[in-house]
Amino acid sequence: MSNLRIIVANKFWYRRGGQERVMLDEIDWLESAGHEIAHFSTQHPENDPSPWADYFTPYLEIGIDSTLPVRQRALAAGRMFWNREAARRFARLLRDFRPHLVHVHGIHRQISPSILAEAKRAGVPVTQTLHDHHPVCPGDVLLLGDREACDPPRCGHIDYLPCVLNRCVHRSLSRSALAATELFWRESVVRYESLVQAFISPSRHLAARVAVDAFRHTPIHVVPNAVPECIADGHASAGDTFVYAGRLAHEKGLPTLLHAAGLARVKLVIAGDGPLGPALRASAPPNVDFVGRLGGDDIDALIRNCRAAVIPSECVENAPMAVLEAMMLGRPVVATRMGGIPEQIRDGIDGLLVQAGDAPGLARALRLLADSPELADRMGQAAGDRARELFAPRRHTDALLAVYDQVLRPA
């Protein structure tokens, strides 16, 4: 494929989470392959430097911690549906950069579908990577009442009333109603699917769910996420600690993990922060150590020298980067059978899979690896081999370019 000019759009331009890590790594790999990338985002105060920042649209915080006055909150709410300023700035970028295609990631609630309409007006095809369940869930994460897994989803087919009735967004009636209305608008008025030529899903699980409940007529390509192979430098062998690295939130299964660690009597290190932090620290048994939020290199070092990484999620995960990063570092993963996780881990080969919310079952898995460092090392070796084969940058980039080629091919 000849070199392409691509606009990549996302509402944040810093490594806020797995979505941004995927996007920024993809940009690095595409540029290394000779393609030219322009950026489009919001003017978030934590953004990384970008030569395209003059095109970025103003940012208004609309999350639960927003301190905006009432008038600006109303403006931010309106921009969720159709951001005219973003459309104006994006149209200028389209004229100046003249891309072959546009690749969007997360644009809902900040940038809005308005930029997709500008791309259509300019005759530029659009691809979108789906990082969460937003196409079928106003709350993004398939949590009923913001507490328990909602699978299969109660919402879908332009019926988003269950989200409102169960207060699925921050347990707030008003926020749930706003999010449900935004998704109804997107599907029934904007007809979002007609503005995108191809969707990309990191997991078969998400692709199947979205194909049934949201995008029935547009191709959905499964392209697994990838991890930079450089993080695997050095030899990994079994230490004596288990590690959880991520957000400290109820849906991540952390109360279950603390219970399991107590039952199994294993050393557990928890790295990260979040709303559940104080309660977890207060209830943790003495064999659990909280180290707070760490940088990427420190997280890698922690996982490289652990017995196994633990992903005890009780929500419907898509394709967690935490799983792939541990595998690339040569460590096995103990995780729950939620969403796309079983597509990443082969039970008994690369790690161990347990039922969500099952503390005794999780404790047995932890104890099994605690009693056998040889088994942990054997699984870790298999995990590293699998990551380098299936979740490597070259394989991911080739698959991404194949999607682009299909989108750009004349009908």
Image: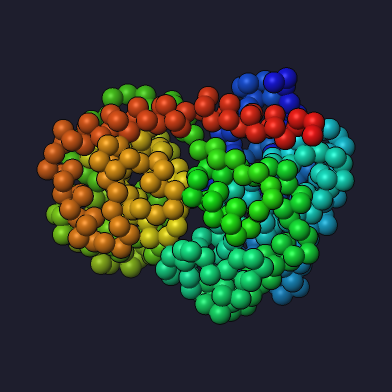
In the rendered image of this protein, does residue 258 appear above or below residue 235?
Answer: below
Q: Is residue 248 visible?
A: no
In the displayed structure, would residue 115 be above or below residue 300? below
Q: How many marks?
A: 0
For the C terminus, the quadrant is: top right
Seen at 69% across and 47% down, the residue is 218
109 displayed left or right of 252:
right
Q: Nearer the viewer, residue 75 or 186?
A: 186
Percent coordinates x, y for residue 76 in the rendering: 72, 65
**Which of 159 and 232 lies nearest the eye of the viewer?**
159
- Report the side of 50 relative to 145 (left or right): right
Describe residue 9's horizontal placement relative to residue 32 as left or right. Answer: right
For the point 71% across and 62% down, the residue is 187
Q: What color scheme is it?
A: rainbow
Q: Which x, y percent locates residue 298?
A: 37, 38
Q: Is residue 134 left or right of residue 229?
A: right
Q: Quadrant of residue 296?
A: top left
Quadrant where the N terminus is found in the figure: top right
Q: Residue at x 73, y 19 (%)?
A: 2
Q: Position of residue 35 (x, y in %)?
A: 69, 24
> Residue at coordinates 14% horizontally, 54% vertically from top-left?
265
Q: Is residue 191 visible?
A: yes
Nearer to us in this view, 231 or 131: 131
Q: Quarter of the image holding residue 303?
A: top left
Spot the residue most to the left: 371
Residue 246: image x %, image y %? 40, 51
